[in-house]
Every structure is written in C-alpha cells, then in structure tokens.
Amino acid sequence: MKIMIAGAGSVGRYMSEQLASFGHEVTLIDSRADALTPQRVPAGIRTILGDACEVDVLDAAGAASADVMASVTGDDEDNLVISLLAKQEFAVPRVVGRVNNPRNEWMFTDMWGVDVSVSTPHLLTALVEEAVTVGALIRILSFEQGRTQLSEVTLAPTSPAVGRTIGELGLPREDMVVAVVRDGHVVRPNEDLTLQGGDEVLLLIGVDGENSVRSALIGQ
Amino acid sequence: MMRQSRLDLAMEQPAASIAFERIADVRARTRTIVCGTVVRVKTRRSTSVPSIEVALEDPSGTAFAVWPGRSTIPGVGLGGRMLIEGVASETSRGFVFLNPSYRLLPER
C-alpha cells in the first residue's frame, strides 16, 4: 500500500519505519529539513520537504494515488487542514488524523475528511481507566467514525451480571461480548459462560447500545 | 501556486457552455465536472457544526456533494440545477464530492 505521512516528528518517523518494514511504500512529508536527514529517517522511505497543508506539496508527494494519508504533526490545525485536503482534493480512501489536544477531538470527523481520529492522550487515559476502574464502562477505541465502540467493564462483585451466563444477559444484537479476561487468561465468550466478579469483559458496542450494556453489566 | 479548479477558471465563461461528464462515467479520485438537478438537500448537525449534503441527479445516476461548516447554500434548493467540480470518493452509496466547487445554472 502507498502510505503518506505528514509530520516527521517522533510519531511520524516511528510510523514510517514500522510501515516500511511491513512492506508498504511510505512517503514522509515535513517542512523542516533537519527532520528529514538520513540520520533521522531510515533509507527506503521517500521524503518530501514541504508544507503538507499545500495542495501542490501533497500532489508532488503522490496523494493522487495514495491509499492512506496519516496526518500526525504536533499541530491540530495543520492535521485538520491536511486531512481535509487529502479527502477533498485527492479522495484518499483512508485519512487518519492525530489529535494532540483532546479538546479538538470533536472536529476530527468525516465531515472534515477524517476517517479515523486518534488522540493519544485520550487513548492513554482510557487505558489507565481500564486498568484501575471497576464497575464502570470504559470506552477504549472507536471504529467507523464512532459508530462502533470497543469498550471494557471490569465486573464489580455487586454487578447484576455476576452468576449469570453471557446468553442470560440478553444484550441486543448490536452489542457483542468479544472476550472475557479472567485471572490474566483470555476466556472465549460462549453463550453459556458464567460471569464472575472481577472478570474484565470486552465488548463491541453499536450506536445507542451503551444503555443496555450498562444495565446488564453495571446495574445503572 | 495553488492548483485552480477549472470552474474557478471558467468564471468568465457562461455556465451553459462548460463541458461536463455523465455521473455514470465518473471515476473515483479523478477531477471531474458533473451537472445535475438537486433531488435532495439534507442538513446534518454533528456536535455544533452543520454540514449540507446534496443529492444531484442526471439521466445516468446520482452523486452526492457535502459542504462542511454550513447549513445552507444560497440558491441551492430542490429542483435547482448546478455544476459541481471536484474529486469524488467512492463510498457504499455512490460517489461523494467533499466541498466541491459549484456553479448554479438557470432553471430550464
């Protein structure tokens, strides 16, 4: 796949190295010459010195035939502009936008060209919450522009789900238990698996599915 | 220098003389101009920012255009005819132009 990455900071450089090692054709764009030196960027990665917010630069970098545009600069405004241009001018099939300040996350939607937004602070917070919180629904990751959510609940001893099987939970079709982690082991979530206090339940939840999950697993 | 869309360049040209292609002949990711009648106008409101989505129909099919950040476009309404220029993405429901250039045409 042809992947374009805007922003050759530590995130962009790491991504380009990883993706190139998987066999993808990677182009890395940055406006700073010192970010694109051979010492910083491994061989085999095409580099473009220029402002990725300019259509001509994206064009020269090959946006017209790129499969993915990942805008991962440290500036949210730039990431939004680059994402919009990638979708509007080049119809890049998959546009990924990095959100540095979680307060800006609401803007990174398909309306502005972003197919997937990734907010590292948000992800870190969710993972911290997931590790320490019992009896609450933690949203870890969104798919499909937020229409599907990967979430986690660690069952409190008082959870209405303790002692019931997954089948007995009566969750709607849009919600699916995808894994249960018990004592450090992943347990397959069969319909007749009986849930215990302390189980970490991982779910894929569709739009409007959270209320059902909350009442079944938390009791709200 | 910014690439200029052909419509922007053709502002001096009468709209009726601008060449366009059939919606059925549109290829994804290739800059093109299509001409059609507005058959649906939908305003979406995601968080506090609106967007307007138009379904444009010509004898060969339907395409969609989305303009973010606004809830109306003056002069664009059901039954109106317009030219749009842009690069279409292929989606499950058809071709979608994000923020295309456009010119309104007089009613037939």
Image (cartoon, coloured by chain):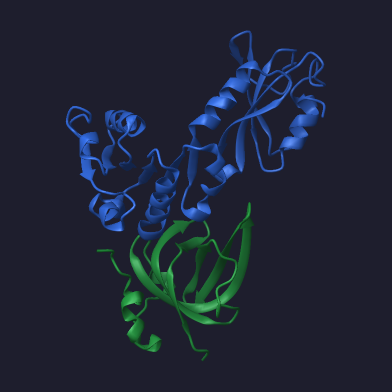
Chain colours: A blue, B green
Which residue is pictured at 71% across the width and 12% down the height?
Answer: A198
Q: Is residue B59 visible?
A: no
Looking at the image, the residue that sits furthest to the top is A183
Q: Which percent across, then down, holds residue A184?
A: 59, 9
Where A52 falls versus B32 (above or below)? above
User: How many numbered dots are placed on residues in this image?
Assistant: 0
**Closest to the observer: B26 or A11?**
A11
Horizontal arrangement in the rendering, residue A202 relative to residue A109 (left or right) = right
Quadrant, the N terminus of chain A: top left
Question: Is A96 in front, or is B94?
Answer: A96
For image coordinates 44% across by 48% down, the residue present is A77
Answer with the quarter of the image where residue A204 lies: top right
How far across and how far down the image is residue A113, in percent? 46, 53
Q: Is residue A34 found left or right of A10 in the rendered image? A: left
Please say whether residue A201 is visible from this viewpoint: yes
Q: Is residue A216 above or below residue A102?
A: above
Q: Position of residue A29 (x, y in %)?
A: 27, 43
Residue A208: where, in percent of width, then height? 71, 42
Dividing the picture into quarters, in which one does residue B38 lie? bottom right
Name the residue at 49% across, 42% down. Answer: A116
- The answer to whether A51 is drawn above or below residue B101 in the figure is above
Give the residue displayed 73% in from the left and 18% down from the top. A155
